[in-house]
Image (spheres, grey):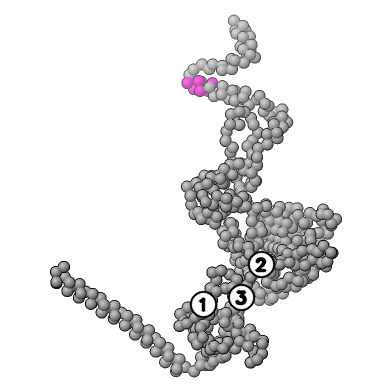
Amino acid sequence: MPLPDVVGVLAYAALAAVALRAVLSYKSAAHAARRLWRWADEWAQAYQYYDVPRLVAAGDAAENPLFRKAAAYVSSLPSLEDADAACLLSSPTKTNDFSLQLGPGHTAHDAFLGARLAWTNAGADRLVLRVRRHDRTRVLRPYLQHVESVADEMELRRRELRLYANSGSSDGAAPRWASAPFTHPATLDTVAMDPDLKARVRADLETFLKGRAYYHRLGRVWRRSYLLYGQHGTGKSTFAAAMARFLGYDVYDVDLSRAGTDDDLRAMLLDTAPRSLILVEDLDRYLRGGGSDGETSAARAARVLGFMDGLSSCCGEERVMVFTMSGGKDGVDPAVLRPGRLDVHIHFTLCDFEGFKALASNYLGLKDHKLYPQVEEGFHAGARLSPAELGEIMLANRASPSRALRTVISALQHVAAPPARTSSAAAARPPRLSSRLSGHLDEPNTAASESNAASLSPGGFGKETPMREFKKLYGLIKIRSRKEGGVVPVDDTAGSPHRRVSDASATEKDR
């Protein structure tokens, strides 16, 4: 490389280094100026400092609840990520759950109602809240209430949910609750449901969560009840689990047939905690009665009515009651279905094409596929499958989305059994999509088809009739085509003995 080129490259490199240094110097100077301004502002202002100790008093084992809530609140501040030092912790019960805590001797800033506040970790289990003196009267109490409410909500979201079920005792003792961790992973986002309906249910739940003051002003119990009804396999129990996960509530699964006497059921309700979801499945089956205990349907209906809105059901606040039914609402007492006992009715239907796409997105990660038009054609023809059936198909074929979609298409084609056999040609045709909203794979029943064909009315087609009717139709078509073409029609049914005799007699008469 010539010497002038080398000198030029070195000159450009020197200019780039000078420019980079100037930029860095400018940023450093701006940062130093901001810190200087903050220090001058803090030095010029008068502040009030509030200690928040961990223990109520020295030597006392009682813990200060405000310290625990303030520590949880400070760990959620966005400014903690910009603090000079922070402690990184992981959850002992959940994997991949990390949190930040303020390091000893360092400060995290916050803002509330236009006032600037700061939390400092003073060490020795002590937090210090700093507030400007002229803001303390205006914001201190509302700010502490805000800290407690945010900390309570965080605690409810992070705590482990539990599932309670009533279990009877072999020695005749009263039923009691048995519990286990509630680990159902369903969420409202993963449930296959009409988007508009899901949004309405989500909004209703959010309104309920924020409605404590409203319910109290009306003098009503802070409670909401839902009826989920539809065929088996349509996702009612999964949706109830998603509701509990969204609300952050424990689940009490009540089996009314094992709840003992009315007094036992009342005692179980009194033993439930607030902020819980009480689930009663297959309500219609229980109301039908006729069980081995000899209890009549009327007695069971009266028991359900007392369970829904009796005084014992009002013992706790912020409670959601969910009832499921596997059939329709026609055979249920209207007193059970009225508002106040069942506020929101949600009908769970078999999957249509939109529900299928939601399931395919969840199970297979598909947004679109070349086989989607065939699947859509099957659904538009009226065939339906339950979410449970579709989910099992996709789960079994999750390694190959194309194979899963082909299996769904085949299942849609076999939703309904083919019609009764009319001829060998008709039997050889592939099965067509039926418009029955069955949701089950119906296998053809040959014996039933033959019995139905044998029991047809005289005006219907017999066993030998279809071929003869097809011949007549074919003959009429040929006659019409020949008339239009100016050709004398020829009788194609001359092969019939009866027709040959008739033609012979007509010829003799003409002669």
Element type where label 3 sits in the image: helix
How would you rate the neighbour count of disc 3 (Cα within 10 Å): few for under 14, some for 14-19, many for 20 or more?
few
Q: Nearer the viewer, residue 161 or 142?
A: 161
3D distance between C-alphas at marks 3 and 1? 18 Å
Please give the label number shown on residue 181.
2
Q: How far apart are marks 1 and 2 (CA)?
A: 27 Å
The span shown in magenta is 479-485
The percent coordinates of residue 37 (x first, y second) are 40, 89
**The C terminus appears in which quarter of the rendering?**
top right
- The CA span between labels 2 and 3 is 17 Å
Res. 458 image quadrant? top right
- What residue sits right under mark 3 in the picture? 155
Label 3 or label 1, whichever lies nearer to me, is 1
Q: Judge whether 331 appears above or below 120 on screen.
A: above
Q: Confirm or deny contact between disc 1 and disc 2 (CB under 8 A).
A: no
**Where 68 falls versus 341 (above or below)?**
below
Residue at image x 72%, y 61%?
280
- The amino acid at mark 1 is Leu
Mark 2 vs mark 3, foreground winner is 2
**Residue name at image x 62 percent, y 28 percent:** 423
Q: Decide: is 352 above or below 451.
A: below
Point out the image quarter for the N terminus. Answer: bottom left
Q: Tell me if I can see residue 73 in this picture.
A: yes
**Tag shown at residue 88:** 1
N-term-proximal mark, 1 vs 2: 1
Chain-order first, disc 2 or disc 3: 3
Q: Is residue 176 above or below residue 329?
A: below
Residue type at mark 3: give it: Glu
Q: Which amino acid does label 2 sit on?
A: Pro
Whether the residues at callouts 2 and 3 have beta carbons within 8 Å, the answer is: no
